[in-house]
Amino acid sequence: MSMRQANCRDVKIAIRAAVLAALAFVVFGAAGTTSRAEEASSKTVCVLTIHEDITRNTVYLIRRGLRDAEEKKAAALVLDMQTNGGRVDATEDIIRLLESAPMKTYTFVNDKAYSAGAYIAAATDKIFMSPGSVIGAATPVMLGESGVQELPKSYEEKLTSAMRARIRATAQEKGYNPDVFEAMVDADRGLTIDNKEITPKGKLLTLTNEEAAHKYGNPLKPLLSSGTVKSVDELLEKVGLKDASTFQVSPYGFEQLARWITAISPLLILVGFLALYIELSHPGMALPAIVAVICFAIYFLGYFVAGFAGWEEIALFVFGLALLALEFFLFPGHFVSAALGTIAVMAALVLAMTGRLPNDPILPSWGQVQIPLAKVFGAMIGAMIGAMLLARWLPKSTLFKKMELSAATSAAEGYTTSSGPARALLGSTGVAETNLRPSGKGRFGDQLVDVVTEGDLVERGKPITIVEVQGSRVVVKRVA
């Protein structure tokens, strides 16, 4: 057996091993996740720390916390809250996330929960407050570069009306008195219960821990808070989870980075696929493959930190790439593995962007995938246009010629470049030593040459002829 045959055999063995490893990762990784979830104690509690203004980063934090809690089958999720408020749009997203939570949810007001913090607390099953803490003053505000800014009067009235309806529905669903939260939102309402004025008209309602826990009505019921506790541990004791084990979910510090990554995700997909095209059409260059790996790694990292993607989407993406490798390197021409691989890769990219919520069906709804599909297909179309432009321009560029020459195998191993011996082979007929997609290797007598077709696929072993030699670029076509 020649060294070249041995090398080909080793490459095939390596590819088969990679495919089997990917399959094993998908199967056993999913099984391992299920096993870990089944082994998780029903007395596990997730403690999610929100000691910051409410921003889009907080949405990512809540989503990640719910995902971790769901995977570990946590019995409850506790929001350890200390916030001055924040963005209304982020708050609405957080409320929707908490409303879909499959476990009990509690808020521990650790010092303060103003504005958006009060909205979010209303979406949890029970609210507890620490000694000396306050909650309320939930008027809509705008966060700008200089901090909290006042809204224009007309816009404030419109937003207040919308938030009153939203917070009223949320409070009713969780069993709170909606009038309490309306008094926090609308200063014109005031709040009077049992003929006792809690707050006069013209002032927004803000409650201390003792005021929030005071009982009114018949039968007696706390105004808002289920009690005053000094710590999360005491809260858990109050709700019957004294012996529960807890795990913390705190900001990574990468949430802002994740926000930027998710914003440029279509660009990452476009560059990643373009780099893969360059590597597959001109194998051996290595740099495009590295760029593609970096782009897709950043893509999944961003959505993983943001709480959208999990290991399932990453495994599906690797599995899709393995199927594409089967098509390109082992079974060219039948297109089955290529089609399945393309579907798996596309599905992984879309699902990573979709972000399945707790209690959602396995298959996302059309509303969930509509925007991700538009972004992914838009990036794919951009990549195809870029590939067509590169097919014309790249082989003639000085940078590409340098990269191609650096990747070429030395003449001592039987290879040659187009400058010199290859130029003398113009018009010669040989065979495709590898699949030409559109580039690869061609053998002409005892010489092995880096060649490229004019865009056609030529399978290994088919006769080819050299029709053009341009610098380091040797163009061939299949002999009919």
Image: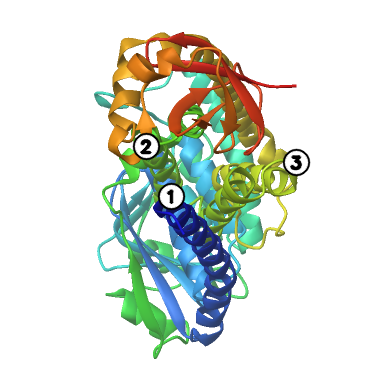
Task: Choose top left, top right, bottom left or bottom right for residue 467.
Answer: top right
Identified by mark 1, the residue type is Arg
Look at mark 3 in the image and give the residue it sits on: 366
Identified by mark 2, the residue type is Gly
Secondary structure at numbered mark 2: loop
Residue 4's disc is 1
Q: Nearer the viewer, mark 3 or mark 1?
A: 1
- Circle 3 packing at 10 Å, graded few (<14), some (14-19), many (20+), is few
- Circle 2 packing at 10 Å, graded few (<14), some (14-19), many (20+), is few
Residue 414's disc is 2
- Disc 1 versus disc 2: distance between alpha carbons? 10 Å
Sequence-wise first label, 1 or 2: 1
Residue 247 percent coordinates (x, y): 35, 74
The residue that appears at 56% across and 13% down in the rendered structure is 427
The residue that appears at 24% across and 24% down in the rendered structure is 146
Q: Are the residues at dot 1 and dot 2 in contact (C-beta closer than 8 Å)?
A: yes
The quadrant the C terminus occupies is top right
Nearer the observer, 127 or 191: 127
Q: Nearer the viewer, mark 3 or mark 2?
A: 2
- Disc 3 versus disc 2: distance between alpha carbons? 55 Å
Please say if 287 is above or below 191: above
Residue 231 percent coordinates (x, y): 28, 75
